[in-house]
Image (spheres, helix red, strand yellow):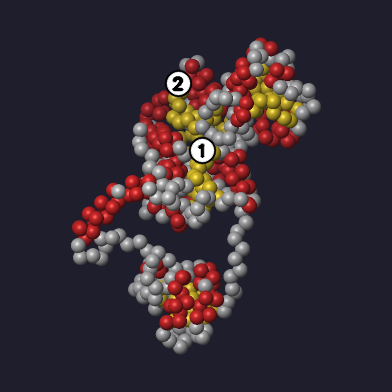
């Protein structure tokens, strides 16, 4: 497999179509900052002879638009649509390549708790810090209109977020219209409160996050723009929710005591190895969709998918959602901490022996090795002479196994074998040992493996196509296809399955 190969179900990363070098804008407190610090983009794209140049940091979207227009950046970063619209209306040669609706909405107008300001109407005659032609200013305008306050009754003070924060803290402005994470920090740092909150006080969507580039760049790199747009459109049609870092943090807090959470990186394993967000597990998108139970073991759990190209996570999520999973995609500009409180791991006390090392097992000719790996894993290679056994049938299999020497249990890393030690010991009077480190340790010691299979139990965990191994493959294949074509209708009448198929527009 080539270093950056993608799963079959998901489009290849459109970044491969970019000119080299290309310039990416980045902003503080965003996913682009994390990617820059870790060197993810550089490492991944270097394998494709593509060089990345970072431009920034930008405090908010408007300055990044100026960089795109000026030619110092090919892309801005995910930011508010409002300043981009203002720039386009003013004649800037910009085009939107993608829009994003994030939840929960976080922008608010805040004041200090001791300011005496308790409502939007109290802003009359006051100074309010906003970013010019951006989400902050638009929210204040919307709040004034909703409360019947003339715009000229309030003094707008145009400041970018890095300047607005100290101005608000020092009392140079009476209120500040800002989004996460700045507004969250300000509430704590300056003992502030909301007098208007976008998520609850506004009955319409005031803004989108958007990605912009110059029209010429978009026309010359159509594959890039089209792949991202198509993935976003389909995910939106299916109903895949896109979340920000704040929502992910809440999901992680819930996972402590209430609801299981899976955070999965759907990129290629090589990309994952080069760097990934803290707490995310590698789950290549195609394999995740086709072998979901390899990663998702708790029904009703939350699932959050991550990628760095706005394509693969959305496509994988669109399938999982139709399969009944509560799946979310992490937005590109999410602010993610490098450390967080990991959910408590299941407390399972595994027996610590009796063990036999790989070298010792190699010198035990009368030992019977029983492998508790999954059938497919066992079939790819196991300790020579090892028997495949299924956990539920282990007591029977151990009791019926011929021989007088010790029985040695193994599994890929030894954990499943250890968990079944007591079952095996109760079923026989023969000594039962554990292969220390499992079959992985056997391989690591440079000892040989074989693929010839011996079954004590039927491999019930291995799916076999209905026409495999038959004397009339064509008839069985046609019967299978006929069954498959009726499957959607059958699922509609199933009281347990949560599948639902979304039709294309």
Label 1 element class: strand
Quadrant housing the N terminus: bottom left
Q: Quadrant of residue 104?
A: top right
**Residue occupying the point 45% across, 56% down:** 293
Residue 15 is at least partly visible in this image: no
**Residue occupying the point 35% across, 36% down:** 504
Mark 1 crowdedness (10 Å alpha carbons): few <14, some 14-19, many ≥20: many
Label 2 element class: loop
Instruction: Choose between 209 and 113: the one closer to the eye.
Output: 113
Q: Is residue 151 above or below residue 47?
A: above
Q: Is residue 427 left or right of residue 475?
A: right
Instruction: Choose between 28 and 243: the one closer to the eye.
Output: 243
Residue 402 placement (x, y as % from top left): 41, 85
Quadrant housing the C terminus: top left
Q: Nearer the viewer, mark 1 or mark 2?
A: 1
Q: Quadrant of residue 115?
A: top right
Q: Is residue 296 left or right of residue 119?
A: left
Residue 245 placement (x, y as % from top left): 58, 40
Give the Cα separation between the discs numbered 1 and 2: 28 Å
- Residue matched to label 1: 242
Q: Is residue 206 above or below residue 275?
A: above
- Residue matched to label 2: 93
Residue 53 placement (x, y as % from top left): 50, 37
**Residue occupying the point 34% across, 73% down:** 452
Instruction: Choose between 80 and 315: the one closer to the eye.
Output: 315
**Residue occupying the point 48% across, 19% down:** 88
Which numbered circle lies on residue 187?
Answer: none
């Amino acid at each position: 497999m080539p270093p950056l190969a993608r799963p079959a179900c998901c489009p290849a990363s459109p970044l491969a179509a970019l000119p080299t070098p290309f310039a990416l804008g980045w902003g503080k407190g965003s996913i682009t900052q994390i990617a820059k610090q870790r060197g993810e983009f550089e490492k991944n794209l270097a394998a494709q002879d593509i060089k990345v140049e970072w431009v920034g940091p930008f405090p908010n979207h408007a300055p990044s638009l100026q960089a795109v227009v000026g030619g110092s950046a090919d892309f801005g970063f995910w930011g508010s649509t409002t300043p981009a619209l203002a720039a386009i209306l003013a004649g800037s040669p910009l085009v939107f390549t993608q829009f994003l609706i994030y939840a929960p909405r976080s922008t608010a107008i805040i004041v200090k708790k001791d300011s005496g300001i308790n409502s939007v109407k109290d802003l009359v005659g006051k100074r309010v810090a906003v970013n010019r032609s951006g989400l902050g200013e638009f929210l204040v305008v919307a709040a004034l209109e909703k409360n019947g306050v003339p715009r000229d009754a309030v003094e707008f003070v145009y400041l970018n977020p890095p300047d607005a924060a100290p101005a608000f803290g020092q009392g140079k402005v009476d209120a500040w219209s800002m989004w996460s994470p700045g507004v969250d920090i300000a509430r704590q740092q300056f003992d502030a409160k909301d007098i208007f909150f976008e998520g609850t006080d506004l009955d319409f969507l005031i803004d989108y996050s958007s990605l912009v580039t110059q029209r010429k760049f978009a026309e010359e790199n159509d594959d890039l723009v089209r792949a991202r747009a198509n993935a976003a459109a389909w995910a939106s049609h299916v109903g895949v929710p896109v979340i920000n870092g704040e929502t992910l943090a809440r999901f992680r807090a819930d996972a402590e005591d209430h609801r299981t959470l899976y955070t999965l990186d759907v990129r290629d394993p090589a990309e994952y190895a080069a760097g990934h967000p803290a707490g995310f597990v590698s789950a290549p998108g195609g394999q995740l969709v086709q072998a979901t139970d390899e990663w998702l073991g708790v029904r009703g759990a939350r699932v959050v998918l991550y990628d760095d190209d706005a394509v693969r996570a959305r496509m994988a999520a669109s399938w999982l959602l139709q399969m009944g999973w509560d799946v979310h995609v992490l937005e590109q500009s999410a602010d993610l901490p490098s450390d967080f409180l990991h959910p408590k791991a299941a407390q399972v006390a595994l027996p610590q022996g009796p063990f036999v090392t790989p070298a010792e097992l190699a010198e035990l000719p009368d030992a019977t090795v029983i492998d508790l790996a999954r059938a497919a894993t066992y079939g790819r290679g196991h300790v020579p002479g090892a028997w495949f056994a299924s956990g539920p049938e282990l007591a029977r299999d151990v009791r019926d196994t011929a021989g007088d020497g010790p029985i040695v249990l193994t599994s890929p890393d030894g954990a499943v074998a250890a968990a079944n030690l007591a079952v095996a010991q109760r079923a026989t009077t023969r000594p039962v040992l554990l292969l220390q480190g499992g079959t992985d340790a056997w391989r690591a010691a440079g000892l040989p493996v074989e693929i010839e299979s011996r079954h004590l139990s039927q491999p019930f965990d291995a799916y076999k196509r209905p026409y495999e191994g038959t004397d009339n493959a064509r008839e069985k294949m046609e019967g299978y296809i006929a069954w498959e074509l009726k499957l959607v209708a059958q699922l509609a009448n199933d009281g347990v399955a949560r599948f639902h198929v979304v039709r294309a527009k």
